[in-house]
Amino acid sequence: MKNLSSQPCLIARSLALVGDAWTMLIMRDAHAGLTRFDEFRKSLGIAPTMLTARLSALTEHGLLEKRRYSERPPRDEYVLTAPGQDFLPVLFAIGAWGRKHRAGGDVTRFFDAETGTEIDAVTIDRETGAPIGTRPIRVDLPE
């Protein structure tokens, strides 16, 4: 397979960074307010080496910023950057798809902290206002 990060398709380039489940779940947890290694590890049940690798990649590519919160012992936290904050709609779009096609049993629900209403994400085209997926699309590949 070609290196996805050098593809002309922006979906492929993005998946090169965030295209695995652990990375998506780390980003979900970061949006839920988790910042510390042990918090991510406890929430996800992920192996420390795998978590270290994912946090390093997210930091290297600018979705998270590593900040020192303790000198003795040295400890860092991982906070969302502006690009990391911009990733939230992606997570909600995946969640909306899951609600439609993978729901059943107890599921995690997301609420607006100010209004208390459950979030029902919809992706729309800015120009037409039409929900994505309701109109035909055309894909123009670079030559």
Image (cartoon, helix red, strand yellow):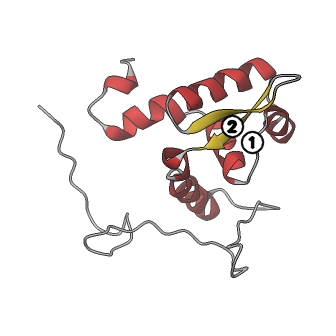
Which quadrant of the view contains residue 36?
A: top right
At mark 2, the secondary structure is strand
Task: Report the amino acid beneath label 2.
Answer: Tyr
Going from N to C along the chain, the mark reached first, 2 or 1, is 1
The image shows residue 142 at horizontal and vertical percentages of: 15, 35
Q: Are marks 2 and 1 in contact (CB under 8 Å)?
A: yes
Q: Residues within 10 Å of mark 2 (few under 14, many from 20)?
A: many
Task: Report the amino acid beneath label 1.
Answer: Thr
The image shows residue 114 at horizontal and vertical percentages of: 69, 78
Residue at (58%, 30%) from the top-left corner? Answer: 59
Q: Which residue is mark 2?
A: 78
Residue at (76%, 46%) from the top-left corner? Answer: 34
Eyeballing the image, is 5 above or below 124?
Answer: above
Which quadrant of the view contains residue 68?
A: top right
The image shows residue 10 at horizontal and vertical percentages of: 33, 39
Q: Residue furthest front?
A: 71
Residue at (68%, 34%) from the top-left corner? Answer: 67
Give the side of residue 3 with respect to residue 41, left or right.
left
Placement of the C terminus among the 4 image quadrants: top left
At mark 1, the secondary structure is loop
Residue at (38%, 68%) from the top-left corner? Answer: 124
Placement of the N terminus among the 4 image quadrants: top left
Q: CA distance from mark 2 to mark 1?
A: 5 Å
Eyeballing the image, is 96 above or below 44?
Answer: below
Q: Nearer the viewer, residue 4 or 65?
A: 65
Q: Residues within 10 Å of mark 1 (few under 14, many from 20)?
A: many
Rendered image: mark on residue 35: 1
Which quadrant of the view contains residue 7?
A: top left
Give the side of residue 80 with respect to residue 35, left or right.
left
